Image (spheres, helix red, strand yellow):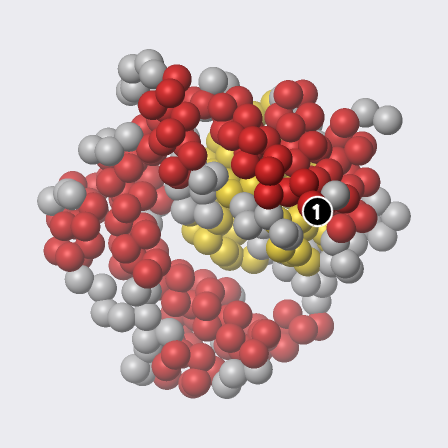
């Protein structure tokens, strides 16, 4: 049995049903889908996504990529993407392993390895041919779920190996820029974190820029270049996605969900919700309950 088949088997074994499953390893999530899903907007955290079976399409603005067992996806900063499973069935479900990038571990590796940080025009959303070494490491990492007593000692070592292989791979320059203090990617990453911490409050661009260590004009320019959104548009997506989650999973009314994420005007909330999701809140939620579940990651 090859390693990608082994990875598929262990993911399938540890995911109960369909959807996203957290694990005993904080940075590792497993995803399973039995059928194609509807396009679902979501913020993808900086992560490595390895599909063991099936395929998926993700889009940011007009840019769209499809990844599968022959290609892996690397998201270098938290990005608002639209994703949907395009190849899955009960007989051959979509199976994916998502490994969040630990910034502290990444920075420590950079210090220990050394080397200059070179300028790069690599995309923050990267699609790359499958790497046997990454698949092998991911298989060993997820395989620790079969022996939970080994997770505490071995998971950090394998995660470090995975990050090392990413740093020394074709996307290494991009990750180095994200982790390097003072780089525009690092500054935008800090701005994203600031917006996410208080997405339900009115945004103050000067405060976000100060936290990122940028001028307001530089923040707008580089934020839009990296995320394809302005800071205000990014915050709006966070608000609307959280409101959707509150209605879908928590049963909140549209007005309650809108208020909870910072909207004071129900009509503005409904208008902006429809613009993002293609339908008014209640119709969208009814449609989601009737359709195959969207798999966000």
Q: Nearer the viewer, residue 260 or 167?
A: 167
Q: Could you tell me residue 133's position as x and y percent?
A: 64, 21
Q: Nearer the viewer, residue 185 or 273?
A: 185
User: Which residue is drawn at the image coordinates 69% and 45% (left, top)?
Assistant: 149
Counting labels gives 1
| Disc 1 residue crowd, few under 14, some 14–19, many 20+, Cα 10 Å | few
Vertical position of residue 79 compared to residue 18: above or below: above
Vertical position of residue 268 compared to residue 220: above or below: below
When asked about the image quadrant of residue 223, the answer is top left
Q: Is residue 65 left or right of residue 20?
A: left
Give the residue number, with chain letter if any, for mark 1: 148
Q: Is residue 278 left or right of residue 289?
A: left
User: Which residue is drawn at the image coordinates 77% and 44% (left, top)?
Assistant: 146
Q: Could you tell me residue 213's position as x and y percent?
A: 16, 43
Vertical position of residue 25 compared to residue 265: above or below: above
When asked about the image quadrant of residue 251, the answer is bottom right
Can you say which quadrant of the picture contains the N terminus? top right
């Amino acid at each position: 049995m090859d390693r990608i088949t082994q990875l598929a088997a262990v993911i399938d074994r540890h995911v109960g049903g369909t959807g996203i499953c957290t694990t005993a390893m904080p940075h590792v999530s497993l995803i399973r889908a039995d059928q194609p899903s509807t396009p679902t907007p979501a913020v993808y955290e900086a992560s490595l996504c390895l599909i063991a079976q099936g395929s998926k399409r993700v889009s940011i603005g007009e840019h769209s990529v499809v990844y599968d067992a022959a290609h892996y996806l690397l998201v270098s900063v938290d990005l608002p993407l639209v994703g949907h499973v395009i190849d899955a069935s009960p007989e051959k479900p979509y199976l994916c392993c998502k490994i969040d990038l630990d910034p502290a571990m990444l920075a420590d590796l950079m210090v220990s390895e050394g080397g200059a940080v070179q300028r790069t025009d690599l995309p923050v959303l990267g699609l790359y041919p499958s790497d046997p070494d990454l698949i092998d490491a991911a298989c060993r990492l997820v395989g620790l779920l079969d022996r939970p007593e080994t997770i505490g000692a071995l998971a950090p070592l394998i995660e470090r190996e995975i990050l090392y292989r990413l740093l020394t791979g074709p996307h290494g320059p991009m990750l180095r820029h994200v982790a390097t203090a003072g780089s525009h990617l690092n500054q935008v990453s800090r701005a994203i974190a600031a917006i996410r911490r208080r997405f339900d409050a009115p945004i103050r661009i000067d405060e976000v820029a100060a936290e990122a260590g940028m001028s307001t004009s530089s923040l707008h320019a580089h934020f839009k270049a990296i995320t394809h959104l302005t800071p205000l548009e990014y915050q709006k997506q966070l608000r609307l996605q959280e409101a959707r989650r509150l209605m879908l999973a928590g049963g909140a009314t549209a007005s309650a969900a809108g208020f909870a994420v910072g909207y004071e005007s129900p009509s503005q909330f409904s208008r902006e919700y429809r613009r993002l999701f293609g339908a008014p809140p209640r119709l969208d939620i009814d449609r989601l309950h009737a359709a195959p579940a969207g798999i966000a990651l």
